[in-house]
Image (spheres, rainbow, N blue to C red):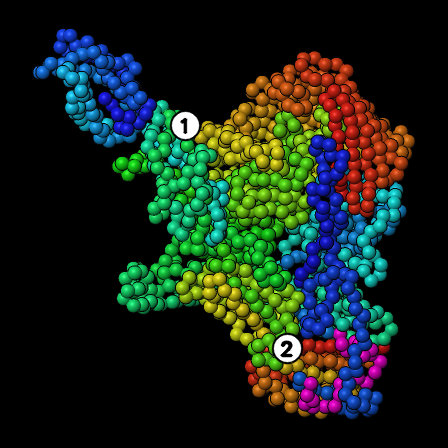
Amino acid sequence: MISDAVFGAGNHKVVSVSLVSAPSGFTAVHNASFNGSTDQRLLTLGGSLLPTEEVIVDFVVDIKVATTGQFANTVVATGASPLDGSPIPQATATADINLDAPGDLKKLIVEKSTSRPTARIGDVIPYKITVKNVDNLDRIDVDIVDFIPPGFTYRPQSASIDGVSVEPVLSGRRLVWTNRTIPASSTVTVRFTLGVGAAAAGNEFVNLGWAEDPLTRGRISNVGKAVVKREVEHVFDCGEIVGKVFDDKNRNGYQDDGEPGLPGVRVVTARGRLITTDKYGRYNVPCADIPDQRIGSNFVVKLDTRTLPTGYRVTTENPRVVRLTRGKLTKLNFGASISSVIRIDLNAKAFVGSSDKPSGTLVQGIDQLVRKLAGRPPSVLRLSYHAGRDREQARKRLQVVSRLVSDRWREVGGRYRLDIETTIVAGQ
Amino acid sequence: MKSIRSSTMFMTGSTIGCLLGTTALVTLSLLGGAGLVLPVRAEPGSSTPTAVAHRAGESSQIRPGENTEKGGAAEDPGTMGFSISVDGERVAGDQRPVDDTRRTDIALNKVDIQVKFDGLDVKPILNVATKDLRHSYQSGDDITFNATTNYPAWIKRAELRIHDAETGLNARPLEVLPVNGIGETVHWKMPATGPAKYLYVLRVYDAQGRYDETVPLALRRTDRDFKTHATEPRHEPVSAGRGEDRTAVRNIQVYGGAVTVFGRDVPDGFAVRAIGETIPVDNNGAFVVQRILPPGEHTIAIDVKGKRDGSVNFERDVIIPENEWFYVGLADLTVGRRFGSRDLVEAAPGEYDSVYSKGRLAFYLKGKIQGRYLLTASADTGEDKVQNLFRDYNGKGPQELLNRIDPDRYYPVYGDSSTAIEDAPTDGKFYVRLERGNSHVMWGRYKTTIHGGEFARNQRKLYGGHSRYSSEATTAYGEARYEAEAYAARPGTLPQRDVMLGTGGSVYFLSRQDLNRGSETLSIEVRDPASDFVITRHQLRYGEDYEINYVQGVVILKKPLGSVAPREDIISDGTHGGNAQYLVVNYEYSPALEKVRGYSTGGRAQAWVTDHVRLGLAGLSEETGGDKQKVIAGDVHVRLSKNSFVEAEKAESDGPGFRSSRSINGGLTINDTGTTGTINRQAAAERVKAQIDLSDFGLAKKGAIGAYYEHREAGFSSFGYDTDKEQRTYGALADLALRDDLRLKLKYKDYWTSAGQTDRQGGGEIEYDWRPQWTVGFGVKHRDVVLPGTVVYGPGLIDGARTDTGVKVTYKPDKDHAYYVFGQGTVSRSGNISRNDRVGVGTEFRVTEKVGLGGEVSYGSLGWGRSCFGQL
């Protein structure tokens, strides 16, 4: 007999059964409708065996099972006692069969794919595994295995095989759909979704899939691979910077009440990102960096002082380094203020007669000023001439005075370049 | 200086009721692209004037400032004649500011002027717009154009060129108006006759004859007084187009430093002159002006002058240095060790091990050398183990992750409107770029712009090395005499090309997702529906013409694209006539499964040997995996003028070709066309094109004659060309104005493939202006085809010939309305080609100043045809 449990229904076909030898008078013939499962009588009734007599039956079966391994083939003999018709004790015998994989059996072809090229933490990614059998033999008892990326979780009730919902067996990072049959020359498609958990790490997430022999745990297919690139989740991964460039009127380095922002000022990062502040002096560096997960990272921003209004100087540290933390906003403000403003207002009376020679009091005044400036923070000099109609003269006189100031400034050893701005206010 | 974008409003994809299953769509787009920069205004309360141009429509009156004099204003004007104060505290001289004339308006004292200069951030600006930003004018209207730029020091002369919109910019301009000075206005009267649509550009020349030119803007003649945007005095554009750059052609090499002058609190009725130009002051008494000046010492003079009473003259000395540097850097070293209880250490092996050291070196540097060379460099090793810092220098760095972030997506998080530019874009650890004028050498991320020929065109966004040379010597036509460009990259991405037939909608799905940011090049190609021969190609601009979602691979056009180009001929072949319109998208993507290894190299060199002969050589090589694709092309261009020329090109390709996809429904379904080339088999292609503008030969008649020939062997493949069978196309056309009221058009085309397909068509049409309002046209067309079935000819293999004739009568009661009726019929037919009889009516009219609508209904042997369209 061949029991169904061994090879599986429909996986074998009896090719021939013949009585090789039998005692004369043994009339039993082989049962033509024998199939090993629903009809398990190999021989029809009608024969009797005397002691020492034997019957030899030759029996050829085609097995379609692709699974390799050892199979036990059991024969069971039953009969009835000729004396009272009661059943005689049944006898069984077992022969072990080693089924080797057919040499030319091709590997299953596994393809894995996802419609999502990128993902962020918290996303749900649909995956598809197709297992293709290129042989013209069915493959039964195939385990379809998916090896999920670390930090990913399987979404329950999301798996289906060819449209029929089948839950996988979960063990660690393995999702296994057991005992699947891949029919000859066709394809089985498994679909499921995974969630990207907070523990997912790395630049890309690799999900592998293959087919396995449950007995040997050996792969019987190639390894399909689906790669999802990680999209930065700014809430969790980024260190953000927001800040303001403000008019630090009291030069204390902090933005106090009544200290407005400075628009149109440029700040620059070390990667060459040039940011121009908006009309309230605000700026941001979205996802400035992905800082170290444990201890954060440093980030540098420098204010381009040439973009400050004339006469303004930075009152805070520039460039400035801050420590970024993952998922946290860091504030980085720059203060700038107009340094001392020195005004010199002039009119014709400050010059000798109609010449361009400054009057003695003016020269004295300038000396006094320059001495006073030497010990002060950087300053801007605004030179105004309140002229009548003669603007040419006004221009000349301003030149003389500004040269005088710069000469004096050099003489006292001024530490910085004194910016001189000139203005002529002309009457009619 | 920043400028607000033109406030263009769009209603994309608005379908209109008459769109019964046919293909056209309507876009309503107000204010087509005219550069609109409205007045510059200072922020009240902020201590500095803003450089930002704001919306018009807000205004505030300047209040005369308080008298800042200390007590006793009317007293003795001071005896010493000067007053020195530090931070408002008197140091020497008189008690109060000296003002012995007392005639200067007190408000003038409040005028606040600031001067900034920047030698590194030099962006030339050139623009022109109509002064009132209108677009449609009645005949006889005086049109005032406002030309603006920030580099007049380089400009020798400027001109405003007005072209007929139909013949385009390549044809001779109808009118060339000299522009006296930048900032000056130019006047033109809308003529009563002639073309109804014009294009205008501003062209400026430097001393060597090189020129820069703006993007064309349209003008249109109308008969109606359309309501337009608010133009009452307070809201009138102060200086149309100022501050916005709309340069299309740039040859002039501008260098030096940018000086920006801001001013605010200019009293009403005062005029400002700065840097030799009258500066418009906005309704809030503020102004801003920027100039690019060559290196050296400059005195910036600003004059604020009233009509009667007084003036202020400011002078600021500015030194634009020959050499200027800006840099920022970071060197970071972390040495650490993590401690924990023994249990913890055992639970997490590797985390508590030993002393670790990590470092990072990063810098950004920008400098100007000798006034003309600009160096930009940046490097970032990323935070890594110290021994890895200098490894893998051209490999892709950790920034790759950051590049996937869409900065606009998180706007609500930050809530400010600062602007940022990436000055050193790179995929790897470093970026360097040395440039001088239009030439540069660089390593980083760049976009190739190889054009000039047809067969080796190449626009890819790559990461690697790139160099470009553009000689300072120019031809008589203003182009650089020698130009060369070369690139080499290990892209790690694959080029993809999607060819999508217009759907009538504006949303198109690309065949790939996760495109490389900024790698796309979109163009609209009008192709022959039978042979796919490209008739015209028009490139789209990001932001103005389309938007794109890189992660999802979705393109949204601002104007919907119909499947059929507007009718040009009297006789149409299908229900709508016209050629097929395709959206062609080239982009780079990173394949999810495989890693791309390989090299991309390419380049082009061209030289104008004389003013009339140009030789060009272009090549590209693309190695992906084991496959190598090579294209090499040489071309010759001989011209008599800009519009009369002969050009020929020969190319050879070797390799499998590039991937492309086609879709007829906007990307919902996609057909991947296999690559057509074969490895180690060369295939050649040739092309000749000739065009003659009759006016170049001194003929009084207007018109153009042209001919073309193109032949490609089976397997020829390049960007944009996949040839699966040998094919050849040639044709000729003539467009002649025989008299002012009589026009003749002739066309012939012959298409043949080795698969036995042929398409020969020839025809002519004549148009006559019978009365001022009436135009009559008559056309004949013959087609002889052997083609697989198409919608145009019917199903199955079409093998036959037919001759069609057609009539079209157009009635234009005024400039804003046109009505036409047409009829066409097949007069002879052989083979199984279907008849092509059709009658129909149509109209075109203007709805508002900037929007026109049109529609057509026809019926014939090929069925109903209905379409409507909108235009600007």
Disc 2: CA contacts within 10 A as few (<14), some (14-19) or many (>=20): few
- Magenta stretch bounds: B88-111
Q: Say what amino acid the circle numbered 1 marks.
A: Ser
Q: Is residue B95 magenta?
A: yes
Q: Nearer the viewer, residue A250 or A218?
A: A218
Q: Secondary structure at mark 1?
A: loop
Which residue occupies 81% across, 46% down? B849
Residue B199, x across and y down, in percent: 76, 44
Q: Nearer the viewer, residue B152 or B530?
A: B530
Q: Secondary structure at mark 2?
A: loop
Q: Nearer the viewer, residue B391 or A228?
A: A228
Residue B300, x across and y down, in percent: 70, 69
Q: Which mark is residue A79?
A: none
Q: Which mark is residue A186?
A: 1
Residue B259, x across and y down, in percent: 66, 66
Q: Is residue B146 magenta?
A: no
Q: Residue furthest left?
A: A52
Q: Say what amino acid the circle numbered 2 marks.
A: Asp
Q: Residue furthest front?
A: A84
In the picture, the quarter occupied by the C terminus of chain B is top right
